[in-house]
Image (cartoon, rainbow, N blue to C red):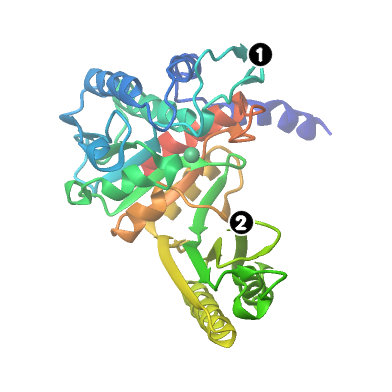
Amino acid sequence: MRRFSFALLILPLLLSAQTQPLINRERATELFLQLVHIDSGSENEAEICRFVVERLRELGAEEVFVDNASEKIGGTGGNVFARFKGTVNASPVMLSAHLDTVAPTKGIKVIRTETEIKTDGTTILGADDKAGVALILEAIQTLRERNLPHPPIEVVFTIREEKGLLGAKVFDKSKLKSHYGIVVDGSGEPGDLIVGSPTHFRFEAVFHGKAAHAGVEPEKGVNAIVMASEAISAMKWGRIDEDTTANVGVIEGGQAMNIVPDRCKVVGEFRSHNPQKVEALVAEWKRICEQVAQKFGGKVDLTVDKTFDAIRLSPDEPIVKAAMKAVESLGLKPKLKRMGGGTDGNIFTAHGIRCLVLPTGGENYHSPNERLVLANFYAVGEILVRTIVELAR
Ligand SMILES: [Zn+2]
């Protein structure tokens, strides 16, 4: 009994020593608040680019530049790159987050409580992904001021991520020496390590029929809407299996009640964690579209574009092992997860930089209810710093 109560006394002390925060929580929060007060909708990143460039220089980056991405993809700023020397001779690691937000945040009214940061509900908060940007900057500052061992670090802050990972797509990946990276842009609990993300295809099918008066001579027409609907109903949609989903998202066509429509456009997507499965779906959809067009005596123009490639990390890859150790060092249980969406990590992974995605501590992304849960934000900051330190071992 005596021994038991002694254990109860000593355990919290042991735990608190183990989880002593490395990051400066108040400084990270202040930085996040500064970032959310800079409006950076997806066309308007110039000001936030200037802000992070200045911070990266203050942190002692040996090289900082802003690329000319906006000339190719629109927007104002550019992708921001910075390189930091390592303290050990280890393989470099890339850290990445995006600077744009899904909607403008002009006139943002931020509410900070003991436990969270949110807005008054008139705009989004922009924790997606300014929480990721703040954590990366705070992690680098922590490593430097505490003299923690770390590999060389390459930072990429992208623009126009919310418009389809555009900034990452045009960034010159030959600048990067890293073979693995951490993208801080996910959702979930601290300890969630996102090791899987699907391959994604977008399609646009335009069915061409023949216009005719619907009452006088319908026989002379070929109904493009009926053609599209037959093709759609021949295909399976929704959740196809545990890896794979398919969706018809947009359908438009027709001019008037009494005209046989000569054109109908269908837009949709296919995703799968298994690249073969998604390619099989694309092939099936192509076959169905062509068969139906032929049957009706019409025509179909189908364009299918791969938006991004899957991420599939295995538990024994160095970046995953390092992050698992970091999570365990905080007394948390690492959970390897898959996400249904894509991040810049999909683009970098396709270029040989194998990316782990960490959550940011944010919730309800892309909505006016978006909020940052401070305890989770701090915990991810600890995981990030400790993962980078592990990579130096
Ligand atoms: Zn994001």
| Amino acid at dot 1 | Thr
| Residue 56 falls left or right of residue 295 | left
Query: Where on the picture, by quarter, is residue 364?
Result: top right
Mark 2 and mark 1: Cα distance apart in space:
53 Å
Which mark, residue 285?
A: none
Label 2 sits on a secondary structure element that is loop
Is residue 319 visible to us here? no
| Amino acid at dot 2 | Gln
241 in relation to 19, above or below: below
Q: Nearer the viewer, residue 334 or 251?
A: 251
Label 1 sits on a secondary structure element that is loop
77 in relation to 269, above or below: above
Q: Which residue is mark 1?
A: 113
**Residue depth check, mark 2 versus mark 1: number of the one nearer the observer:** 2
Q: Residue at point 67% right, 31% down? A: 11
Q: Residue at point 74% right, 30% down? A: 8
Q: Nearer the viewer, residue 340 or 47?
A: 47
89 in relation to 363, above or below: below
Of mark 2 and mark 1, the one earlier in the sequence is 1
Q: Is label 2's Cβ within 8 Å of ligand 1?
A: no
387 in relation to 245, above or below: above
Q: Which residue is mark 2?
A: 255
Label 1: few (<14), some or many (≥20) within 10 Å? Answer: few
Which image quarter is the N terminus in?
top right
Q: Residue at point 59% right, 22% down? A: 123
Q: Nearer the viewer, residue 24 or 200?
A: 200
Is residue 352 visible to us here? yes
Q: Is label 1's Cβ within 8 Å of ligand 1?
A: no
Percent of width and height locating residue 360: 52, 35
